[in-house]
Image (cartoon, rainbow, N blue to C red):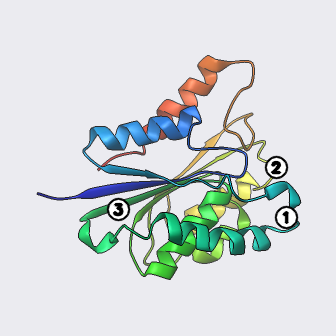
Amino acid sequence: MKKSIAVIFPGTGYTCEEQLLVGCAKKYAAFGYDIVKIDFSEIPFREIETIKEAVEIAKPILLTQLKKIDFKNYDNVVFISKSFGTICAGWLEEHLSIMPQQIFLTPIEEMLPYVKKSSRIIGMVVGTEDRLMNYNFLKSYCAEKNIPCIVFNSVGHSLKYENYPEKTNAINEQIYNLCRV
C-alpha cells in the first residue's frame, strides 16, 4: 500500500490553524495522507529584521520537527506552504534532495530561487493586492515556467476578505481544488 504525506508550512502570522490551511490538511487527510503541521511559534518574528535571518532561525526548527520522518518511505509527498513557509518548503526540498509536489500560497520573492526545472509545482496562488508579491510579476514568472498560477482579484496577502466570509470561503474552495492526488 502506498504511503503519502502532506506537510503544511505556515506563514509568520498565519498558523496552521487558519481555515485555509486546515481545509488543505483535511483534504489530504481524506485522501489517506499523513499530515504534519510545522509550528513556527518559537521564532520571534517581530524581533527579526530580515527574512534571511528568519529563515536561518527556521532551518534547525524545521529539521527538528521533521527529524522522525524519512521522506523516502513515502510514495507521495506534498508540501503546502503560505508566505514565509514557501521559502522553508523550497529550502527543505533542496536540503533533503526530495521531490515533493508543492503548492505555494502567496509566495514571496525569496522563495523563487528554490524553483528548479525539476520542481513539481501544483500551483502558486496570489492576490492582486498582495503587498509582498506583485501579482503581474508572479503570473509572468509562472507562465514562463509553465506553472499554474491562480490570481484572486481585490484580495491581499492573507487571501481573506475581512468583512466577507462567503468570498473568503469561495477563495478557499478554489485552493482546495489544487489539493489533489
Return the residue at label 2: 131
Residue type, mark 3 in image: Val
Residue 135 in percent (x, y) is at 71, 52
Q: Residue under label 1, please give it.
A: 48
Q: CA distance from mark 1 to mark 3?
A: 31 Å
Marks 1/3 in contact by CB < 8 Å: the verdict is no
Viewer-side residue, 3 vs 154: 3
Looking at the image, can residue 100 be seen? yes
The span from disc 3 to disc 2 (Cα, nearest Å) is 30 Å
Disc 2 marks a residue whose amino acid type is Arg
Label 3, secondary structure: give it.
strand
Residue 6: x %, y % from top left: 39, 54
Position of 117 compared to 137: left or right? Answer: left
Specify the quadrant that holds the N terminus: bottom left
Pick whichever of labels 2 and 1 is earlier in the sequence.
1
Q: Quadrant of residue 45?
A: bottom right
Viewer-nearest of discs 2 and 1: 1
Tell which of 8 and 90 is nearer to you: 8
Say which mark, if any, is on residue 77.
Answer: 3
Amino acid type at circle 1 is Ile
